[in-house]
Amino acid sequence: MSTLLAVRKSVSRILLIVTLILTMIVSLFYHSPRAHASVPQMPGWTLQFSDDFNGASGTGVDRAKWIYDIGHGYPGGPANWGTGEIEFMTDSTNNVYQDGSGHLVIKAIRDSSGGWTSGRIETQRTDFQPPPGGVMRVEASIRLPNVTGAAAQGYWPAFWMLGEPYRGNYWNWPGIGEIDILENVNGANTVWGTLHCGVSPGGPCNETSGIGGSQSGFSPSLQSAYHRYTIEWDRSVSPEQIRWYVDGSHFHTVNANQVDATTWANATNHGFYIILNLAIGGGWPGNPTSSTASGASMSIDYVAVWTKGGNGGNPGDPPGSSNYGVENVSPTQAKVWYKPPATANYVILHYIRPGLSQQNVYMTYNSSSARWEYTVTGLSPGQVLQYQFTYNTGGTQYDTAWYSYTKP
């Protein structure tokens, strides 16, 4: 009997050890900074862009896909990236590197003099937007810097998008639109999602705060595990809307009718580019202190963009949408006109004059000519006017292609 009892005890010990080992393996797989997942398959969606950062250990990002932002701001743009953050962004692999296990690491480092360096990258592409009548999904799997409390003071990781007209201008924020898919400050176990638009301060979008929502209390925490941060920008519904998710759980929505139509059009009727960065200090988190930890990092598993539905194109032309033109009115004016292929609730004209930012205005319906019209001013002979139409019919919004007109 004693021998049998000893055998049973030995088997029990072995089973306990095996169970502990399996538990450790599962824990490491799901919660370790080394865990890696491929870009998900999304049935019914078309993948438009992705990066799962499978480069060799210690290498930088793929420059065909990404741009490094350098310094304390865009050349000619607002200081400290417009937010008051204090770090110097670099393209050094001390700050931005692939870890050889399928992750991009963005690390904030304090130097001996008390200054900070970190990393900020943005996509080469600036054309991310839903197809007319369709949906776009933008997602990243991210583990936030694993610091909390006093050690996290001043940390500000973010995954976000800026409207294409901002690139090269840098002074038209927030009118051109900003979609913050993930923001986090000071090591809180909270995610914030926000749409910025309109004018600052105040305006229809409550700037500089924007139209935001948040979710807290994640287990495992945002700092100890990878979570999926997602927006779905949906043009298949009326009113058009943008929805925010963490790990598939919906926590925030902004509908187009929460602001006036011109503000929404200015903020959304164009492409966007994606940004990943780890800021230090600034107006929201406040500046770091002597207790702030140096060397904490934001780890990105993958970034991806999908689209589905719609009537094709990005942008595209519905059948019959070529009934348009421009008439010369005076040496400085030209009348743009458009006849949609179906009765429209409204028509918005988007136009760009040389050297100036895009304008978005509602056209006026001329019943005598049965067309929508708008007179553009401030033109000079020989200048090229670029223009596009957005119209709404039957609750669905359509965008035409871009056209051009040379002022005689």
Image: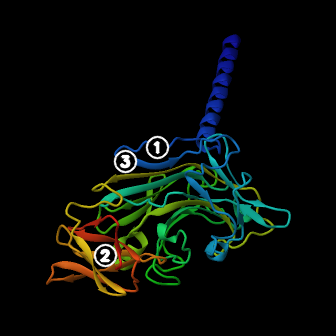
Residue 76 on image: x %, y %: 63, 75
Q: Nearer the viewer, residue 335 or 287?
A: 335
Q: Nearer the viewer, mark 1 or mark 2?
A: 2
Residue under pointer 2: 348
Q: Nearer the viewer, residue 73 or 264?
A: 73
Q: Nearer the viewer, residue 326 or 127?
A: 326
| Gap between marks 2 and 3 measured at Cα | 29 Å
Residue under pointer 3: 45
Give the structural element (helix, strand or loop) at label 3: loop
| Gap between marks 1 and 2 measured at Cα | 37 Å
Disc 2 or 3, which lies upstream in sequence? 3
Number of numbered callouts drawn: 3
Does residue 43 appear left or right of residue 292 in this picture?
Answer: left
> Identity of the amino acid at label 1?
Pro
For image coordinates 54% across by 57% down, the residue present is 123
Q: Nearer the viewer, residue 192 or 73?
A: 73
Above or below, comparing residue 84 to residue 108 in the picture: below
How packed is label 3: few (under 14 Cα within 10 Å), some, or many (20 or more)?
some
Residue under pointer 1: 40
